[in-house]
Amino acid sequence: MAATATSPSTQARLMARWLLAVAALVVLIVVVGGITRLTESGLSITEWKPISGTIPPLTQEAWDQEFAHYRQIDQYAAVHAGMTLSEFKGIFFWEYIHRVLGRIIGMAVALPLAWFWVRGRIPAGYKPRLFALLALIGLQGTLGWLMVHSGLQKGMTEVAPMWLATHLITALFTLAGMVWTALDLLALSRNPAAKPARLTGFAALTGLALAVQLVWGALMAGLRAGRVTNEWPLMNGSFWPGASQNGESLGHALTADPAIVHFIHRWWAWGVVALLVMLARKVKAAGDRRAAIAIHSAFGTQVLLGIATVMTDVSIGIAVLHQLVGALLVAATAWGAHAVGRRA
């Protein structure tokens, strides 16, 4: 019997498409966030106005006021001293777009979820998971402001790298959750008896290793560690660069020393690649060849873009592509992990 517009299978498929559309928006905001970081735009808006901040400055007086606020923070003198109002509008644009996209994503999750909830269209067992995704979106907005706030403090000329890493990894975790949930719903739309996929031990290990790589990638961005060297595979003529900040603790060296952070991100990647190759083999054995191809394509492209980012002294275009493919790699890994965890 053909599924009707209100049948459980149709509703599950509709919800899956909704989540995949929001996942695409998350990928987009990750890319815009990368541009915002690379253009030193993140501190151009010095206040958090969740409602009124949706409207940009519309008059000359409003622009002058925004520019005056920016000139009061330490980043202006250290990075953008002498900037004209026209140049300020350029960096303001990226931070404004980033914040507007965040609001759009929040509404794109909250409003459809409320509609499905009120209409009783959410399949059994999915309400907690969908509510958790909404909570993650709210948390992401809060983390974004805390990240910006860290850069507005006296003596700071940029956001704190650890806040940047937390902000990014939360976005990518949310992306993975949306992809996973959408795949569960698609399976449910095909078979009403389908059970949610389980996270296998190996898939969890691979995801954890990838998360470490992503965190250190964010620390790379926050510390501008990509500019420590433009050589590959050596770093300024040496395999081991040594610490660039002497006399600090081990924890500081691992997370705040640009040369060491760069070294970790550069070589941890190959362990992640090995795990992703094994995951892709398991995915193919599970019968999902497309997911296996997606994993191989994503990590292969990502490695090449990472090398190119370093060798071009962090070209903005290549660095943004590196961040884009990083998000796509997270989605592909979630797809593959779901494939090996599907249950009959």
Image (cartoon, rainbow, N blue to C red):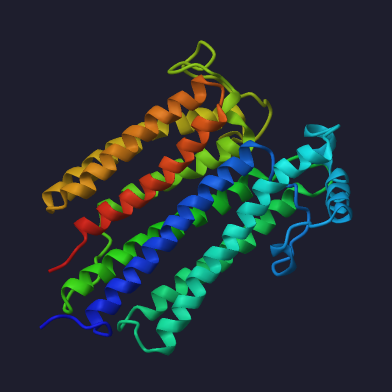
- Asked whether residue 177 appears in the rendered view, the answer is no
Q: Nearer the viewer, residue 294 or 3?
A: 3
Q: Quarter of the image for the N terminus: give it.
A: bottom left
Give the vertical position of 292 relative to 186 (above or below): above
Q: Residue at x 21, y 69 (%)?
A: 187
Q: Position of residue 329 (x, y in %)?
A: 36, 45
Please report the residue visible at 78 percent of the width from the left and 53 percent of the height from the top. 46
**Among the 4 quarters of the image, the one containing residue 272:** top left
In the image, 41 versus 65, the foreground residue is 65
Locate the C terminus by quadrant.
Answer: bottom left
Placement of 316 over or under 324, stated as above or below? above
- Residue 190 as seen in the image, left or right of residue 268: left
**Residue 64 in the image, given as x and y percentages of width and height:** 88, 49
Residue appearing at x 51%, y 75% in the figure: 110
Q: Position of residue 284 (x, y in %)?
A: 15, 47
Determine the image quadrant of residue 4: bottom left
Quarter location, residue 270: top left
